[in-house]
Image (tube, helix red, strand yellow):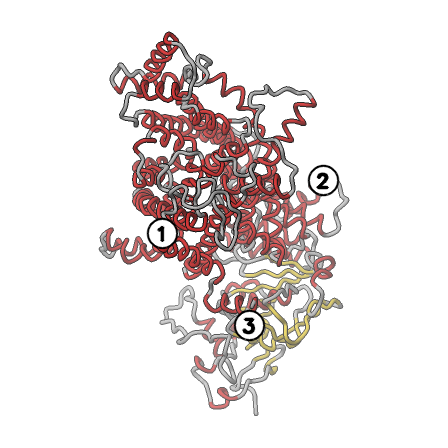
Amino acid sequence: MCSNALSTGVTKSMIKNILIWISKRLIITILVIWIGVTLLFIATRLSPMDPASVIIGRITAWGAGLGGKELEKMRQSILQLYGLDKPVLYQYLDFLKGVITWNFGPSLAFFPTPVIDIINRNIWWTVFLLLTALIVSWILGIVLGVLASYFEGRISKLAVTISSALYPLPYVIFALVLYMIFTIIIPIYSGVGGAGFTMPSLTWSFIVAAISRAWLPALTLIVLWVASWLLTTYSLGISLKREDYIYYANIRGLTRRDIVFGYIGKNVLLPQITALILSLGNMFSGALATEYIFSYPGLGYLILLGLQRADYSLLLGVCTYSIVGVAVAGLILDIIYPLIDPRVKYGFTGE
Amino acid sequence: MKVNNVTGGYYTQKGFVNAVNNVRFEVLQGEVFGIAGESGCGKTTLMKIIYGYVVPPLKVIKGTVVLEDEQIVPSNITLLQKNVWWRKISWIPQAAQNIFNPLKKIFDHFEETLKSHGYGDTPKAELRELVEKHIVRLGLPKEVLDSYPHQLSGGMKQRVAIALATILKPRVLLADEPTSALDVVVQRAILQLLKRMQKDFGMTIILVSHDIHMLGVVADRMAIMYAGEIVEIGDVKSIFEEPLHPYTRALIESVPQLGVKKVIKGLAGQPPDLLSPPPGCRFHPRCPFAMDICRREKPPLIEVGKGHFVACWLYAKR
Amino acid sequence: MGLQVSSMRLRLGVNPIPIAIVVIIILYSFVVSLFAPYDPSAWNMVPRDQPPSLKYPFGTTSLGQDLFWLCSYALRNSIIMSLLVSSIGILIAIIMGVIAGYVRGRLSSVMTFIIDSFCALPALPILVLLFMMMREHLTPITMALWIAIFSWSWPARNIRSIIFSLRERGFTYIAKFSGYTIFDLIRYHYLPYIYGLVVTNFLGIMLWAIGIETTLAVFGLISLTTPTIGLTIFWAMNYQAIARGIWWWIFFPSALLILFIASAYFVSLDLYRRVYLRL
């Protein structure tokens, strides 16, 4: 009767399902990056004054002691970068070409170092911070959320209340508060300032330095993200508890442990992976803001530098990295998803 | 199994909903016992009580439920969970559409149930063999075990639910509307399966449904329930040949039958609100034969024929 | 006191404490600021770097500003800015969400894709670049406009999914077969659901917008003439307030903002519960 649909080995239809899913997501990712990049292009054209002069004016105001020849070279590269001598459409295409070839030209504050080199040096700090904070907070938040939704006692309600208070706060404010707490009240954090461009290496001293630098920004992110995951998991778990299969599991005499992990936990995980994919943009922005406050040597610090020294190219590069990074991370998670959700893997045949 | 004067219901914000009122009957070993009644008459609550799944807001105020020598109500749920549930008495829920964990294979459901009931140390291969044998014996294809719930049709899921409920060969099987929302062909298959349980494994089956004619086909004895109370009990033949209670009569006549060309009369009115049920006999507002005493006093359950009980002032003498 | 609060909570269905806090802060920022004896944002009005005292309840800044009056004024501007963003954003969200949820086929897929794309983009870096480019020409209105462009995506998503599920429900088909036009349908059947959704999302955008505006201000990207909480903190950081021990310059603006945002969020949660429980 339904024996074909019942087989769960690697069937042709299963591979087809997955390939269709992946290719759809790939196209969407590329389109999203394109939209984001186009927005950036629009942004760069928003200053009605000649950007080259503005830029040079700002840089010389900062006292970057460059001679006439170097200023002229910079002027030329800016003109080329923005293609200001050509009509807008060509500028746009050049811009797109730059993105596709992953070339953002030289940095203005650190002329002639290419923007990419500067970013690539610092990006690992951001990746390290993001990955650690994300993994810890996602797992912790979900576990706490599942427990809170299952037990629904006073501690659960307290946890939910605290999370609700933390969840909407801006990262910069919370970071400042933690900074004040841990430098004034309990002075144990000191990693701010200096040491921007050390190359990551696997030496013990580096690791210690990295951790002493990173733990407070990481704590900021972890606390705020745990609050968010706890809240969403909690409401998910509460609504899940009303499902028939939970009721049936109770009747069958399954232990509490079985139900919390196998039933509530498992069914909460999949929507939370989807939620994770969708929140990547927000989380990334939050990480940048936090890095800025702590002068943590990642992309956030580059934003600080770029703003201080009017380095538009650097900022453009950081923005593009952000858009592409978030989109690609989403794509990777999107590809893993069907491998975990049996309803996608095995198609929906039912009745 | 004996259900002795059980009264129970739900505590809600508005008050106490008396879903089961002074219910008393006996189920004999090895028979199929049907409980018929409209939706909302308290059948599912009664089932929960018989099973022993009495969790707030459900509360049993009075009465006991005894299975052989084991007391089910009142009892400690953890004890029931360990010793009684699934081993001595099992439950097939209504509408098996959503009772399986969508992220677990069917076999996993069997495995975890077995592990919770004493098979914790058995190696997986042995469990697998056991389950396969059982499934095949019930006429289900082996491949079902490796499927996910969403890959199965409604009828198949119901049959798997029956297999799951009988894996430990319990003495009693509770089936709550096992055939509603299924087409007639599948209904027949399910009923045949249940009958096989009775014959091959000697199980006692308590079947709850609003479809009195379906019960007429499979059951040996049955009880009619209205508004939380039992109004008639008897063996199926007597009840259909000689329905005593007006409600029973209305239920039987409400379904069109092959070859009978007759205008069907439904029953006027609605089942009462169990929050404040009518005094006296709960059926009197809708009963065509209501007398004065029906409004004032509850009729007792008396034996009229051999093993045929009815609670109606038409038969009880003051 | 706890008993009174919880009984009030049961009776009204809402928790009065966050509402009280929100009201007090709004009074503080809108009404109190009108009584400022001096222009709160002007420099050198009062002696610098004074710790909190009876004369200067929140202390003074290194720029010679009275923090008590300054915060009231700054908070007012922050709130107004977020209201602006929210108004524009919710309008866009409703339009996008309703269309995406109601129409079928190609148009629906395209709209959904646009909404999801904006959800996927990291708002902060793009806004940083935008604001930096437009630095000289930013007015509060244009700032609000640009921030609003990134604010509508999540609410649009919510609205879209609700409209979509409403559209699939029985009464839509019945209404259509009875000859209702689309506008009647929207007005009589959908709007009741949407009202609650709109209010909650409006508040949601507001809180997010305050956060973004504060962040951009701390980066020094907003107009330096209109004081907001974020800008106050920007100046404080520029003047090394923490290192120099002038903790109140950061503490009071932050504390006020945190109180406002957290309380407003609790209020929106209560509202959400009331709206959806009724449904």
Image mark 1: chain: C
Q: Distance between the Cα atoms at labels 2 and 1?
A: 53 Å
**Residue A144 place in picture, x, y as percent:** 61, 47
Residue occupied by mark 2: B124
Name the residue type under label 2.
Answer: Lys
Please tell me how crowded label 3 is: few (under 14), some (14-19), or many (20+) other residues with Cα within 10 Å.
Answer: many
Q: Which mark is residue C198?
A: 1
Q: Which mark is residue B19?
A: 3
Pointer 3 and pointer 2 on the same chain: yes
Q: Is residue A322 left or right of residue B4?
A: left
Query: Element under label 3?
Result: strand
Name the residue type under label 3.
Answer: Ala
Q: Distance between the Cα atoms at labels 3 and 1?
A: 41 Å
Q: Is residue A138 visible?
A: no
Q: Quadrant of residue A35?
A: top left
Closer to the camera: disc 2 or disc 1? 1
Q: Residue furthest bottom?
A: B318
Image mark 3: chain: B
Name the residue type under label 1.
Answer: Val
